[in-house]
Image: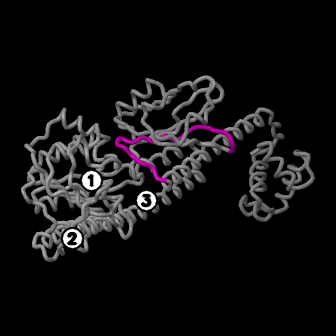
């Protein structure tokens, strides 16, 4: 029923100490329904996840993946005196969400959370080099019935070994039992689910493998369904945002208000806490904030900062996720403003009109965020809308400048009486002699007389030329 896995055993050998690791075939392990504890845990996990999902559906909200993992680890650790760990690979498979639960030794959860934070960031850890990676790659459970604390420590990375040396475990640990199973959704392995019995006192046995595998697979399918639901909600939200942006561009003349609407739609979305639009001023080779949203402290005044000499504007705004501190051209003053806001993640999307870069759409988050290709394509589309708004505003400014030039050279109107101005106004609107006569309560002959007078004063031959000249020279 049990077969040693030589490759894993060799990988776990360090400083002459060999760890006995066993890989199990689930089909040869005791059935979960034959295990009273297994049946009880599976029922509890099902009830907890159904309740969580029902609450989400009731308010038409997105499903929090971390909430699913927290619910599962907490539920399992209530029934098994061990630390339960759920590992779910992110879109970048080298990084995973990691959630712990332990009702017997809650201090271990705090310790492991602090370790993960030191390793990468809160709630996320590298997938590579871990025991879960071995389970994910082999798609088979691993059970270590009894190993020493030193043996488990030697299986960790150099960073992990040093961390344990500098930060002793909060409880006394001598012998440990470990069970880790792959978390699957259909044929794909999406993570791992594990149990760590820190006392090695028989809390885990081969009888736990089957129900753990079933629980892990149910969690994998639940998470997969949640992600599909979240993607559908995101797509509807993004389509609405693009529609609102297009409507604002077509109906609005105020550039700042249009950009503000685009930014407010973005900051209302997952993973975006603040955003602004930077525009380039070719006249003095500077960048300035044209509009902003989501900054709690109001730290984005309309100030300017120079573009570094010899730097192409487009190279300033290369698309990608980074930290504000890593953006050299931003300057120390602006970096300090962003730091005071608690913003930790930064992304810039260039605004381009034709081949020319006119600015950038900047996005900030107060937590670590990741960007998949669909999200990046959406941001490109929103940046394109912002660029169109900027281009439209530039064209309107140019038209107003041309109009002002025309006004400066306008031909003064001929000497018209008040009655003639009334008739000219109606004529320009397209009214005929009968309509004008009815509106002014005059005879049609009187209207004809005044029209002839207008033609003579304007120096034109017909009503069409009269109306055109009156509009061009702004006589009305």
Would residue 328 be counted in the magenta stretch?
no
Q: Residues within 10 Å of mark 3 (few under 14, many from 20)?
A: some
Q: Residues within 10 Å of mark 1 (few under 14, many from 20)?
A: some
Mark 3 lies on residue: 234
Mark 1 lies on residue: 9
Locate residue 24, reporting x and y percent. 24, 66
| Relative vertical location of residue 265 with respect to residue 401 in this rendering, above or below | below
Counting residues from the start of the chain, the first of labels 2 and 1 encountered is 2
In this rendering, the label closer to the viewer, 2 or 3: 2
Q: Residue at x 27, y 51 (%)?
A: 98
Tell me, what colour scheme is on the image? one colour
Q: Residue at x 39, y 33 (%)?
A: 298
Q: Of 362 and 23, which appears nearest the observer? A: 23
Q: Secondary structure at mark 2?
A: loop
Counting residues from the start of the chain, the first of labels 1 and 3 encountered is 1
Q: Secondary structure at mark 1?
A: helix
Mark 2 lies on residue: 1
The magenta region covers 354-372
Locate residue 82, reporting x and y percent. 13, 55
Would residue 363 be counted in the magenta stretch?
yes
- Image quadrant where residue 367 sits: top left
């Amino acid at each position: 029923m049990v077969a040693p896995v030589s490759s894993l055993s060799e990988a776990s050998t360090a400083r002459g100490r060999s760890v006995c690791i066993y890989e199990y075939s689930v089909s040869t392990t005791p059935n979960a329904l034959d295990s009273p504890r297994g049946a009880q845990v599976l029922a509890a996990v099902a009830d907890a996840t159904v309740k969580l999902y029902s609450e989400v559906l009731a308010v038409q909200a997105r499903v929090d993946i971390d909430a699913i993992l927290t619910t599962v680890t907490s539920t399992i650790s209530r029934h098994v005196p061990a630390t339960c760990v759920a590992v779910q690979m992110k879109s970048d498979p080298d990084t995973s969400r990691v959630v712990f639960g332990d009702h017997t030794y809650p201090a271990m959860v705090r310790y492991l959370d602090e370790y993960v934070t030191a390793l990468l960031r809160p709630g996320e850890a590298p997938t590579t080099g871990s025991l879960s990676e071995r389970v994910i790659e082999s798609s088979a459970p691993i059970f270590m019935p009894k190993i020493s604390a030193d043996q488990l420590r030697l299986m960790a990375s150099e960073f992990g070994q040093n961390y344990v040396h500098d930060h002793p475990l909060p409880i006394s640990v001598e012998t440990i039992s470990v069970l880790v199973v792959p978390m699957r959704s259909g044929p794909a392995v999406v993570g791992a689910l594990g149990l760590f019995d820190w006392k090695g006192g028989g809390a885990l046995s081969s009888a736990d493998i089957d129900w753990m595998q079933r629980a892990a697979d149910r969690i994998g399918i639940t998470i997969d369904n949640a992600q599909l639901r979240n993607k559908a909600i995101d797509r509807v939200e993004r389509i609405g945002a693009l529609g609102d942006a297009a409507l604002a561009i077509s109906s609005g003349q105020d550039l700042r208000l249009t950009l503000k609407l685009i930014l407010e739609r973005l900051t209302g979305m997952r993973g975006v806490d603040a955003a602004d639009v930077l525009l380039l001023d070719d006249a003095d080779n500077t960048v300035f904030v044209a509009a902003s949203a989501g900054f709690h402290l109001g730290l984005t005044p309309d100030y300017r900062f120079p573009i570094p000499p010899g730097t192409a504007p487009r190279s300033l705004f290369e698309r990608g996720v980074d930290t504000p501190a890593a953006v050299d051209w931003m300057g120390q003053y602006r970096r300090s403003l962003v730091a005071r806001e608690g913003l930790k993640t930064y992304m810039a999307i260039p605004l381009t009109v034709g081949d020319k870069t006119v600015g950038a759409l900047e996005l900030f988050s107060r937590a670590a965020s990741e960007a998949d290709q669909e999200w990046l394509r959406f941001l490109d589309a929103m940046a394109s809308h912002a660029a169109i708004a900027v281009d439209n505003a530039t064209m309107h400014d140019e038209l107003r400048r041309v109009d002002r030039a025309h006004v400066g050279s306008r031909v003064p109107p001929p000497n018209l009486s008040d009655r003639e101005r009334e008739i000219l106004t109606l004529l320009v609107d397209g009214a005929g002699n009968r309509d004008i006569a009815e509106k002014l309560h005059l005879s049609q002959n009187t209207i004809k007389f005044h029209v002839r007078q207008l033609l003579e004063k304007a120096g034109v031959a017909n009503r069409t030329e009269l109306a055109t000249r009156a509009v061009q020279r702004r006589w009305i």
